[in-house]
Amino acid sequence: MRTTVNIDDEKCKELMRLTSAPSVSKAIQTALSEFIDMQRKRQLLAMRGKLDITDNWRELRQQELEELSHE
């Protein structure tokens, strides 16, 4: 997607330095990707303690193997 934005030159230079990107476009793409990843992690961490998950993967795997052996 092509978008026109006004960004401070000093911030662009700093962003390019921090990301080691060869261009402003690549630096912005990298920064956006990292920001999105960071926000997703924050959202997952915010759910900590709110989900009740049963750790029964071994039992489920055994059931699956038994079902496959009966086919």
Image (cartoon, rainbow, N blue to C red):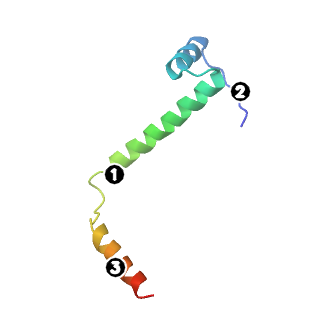
| Residue carrying label 2 | 4
Looking at the image, residue 51 lies above or below residue 30 = below
Total numbered labels placed on residues in the image: 3
Q: Position of residue 4 (x, y in %)?
A: 71, 27
- Label 1, residues with CA under 10 Å away: few <14, some 14-19, many ≥20: few
| Residue carrying label 3 | 63
**Of label 1 and label 3, which has the lower sequence position?**
1
Q: Nearer the viewer, mark 2 or mark 3?
A: 3
| Residue carrying label 1 | 47
| Amino acid type, callout 3 | Gln
In which quarter of the view is residue 63 placed? bottom left
Secondary structure at numbered mark 3: helix
Could you tell me how far apart the alpha carbons at marks 1 and 3 are, in whole angstroms?
29 Å
Q: Position of residue 61 (x, y in %)?
A: 34, 72
Are the residues tagged 1 and 2 within 8 Å (C-beta)?
no
Q: Nearer the viewer, residue 47 or 29?
A: 29
Could you tell me how far apart the alpha carbons at marks 2 and 3 are, in whole angstroms?
55 Å
| Amino acid type, callout 1 | Met
Q: Nearer the viewer, residue 58 or 36?
A: 58
- The structure residue drawn at horizontal position 40% and vertical position 43%, both measured from the top left corner, is 41
| Amino acid type, callout 2 | Thr
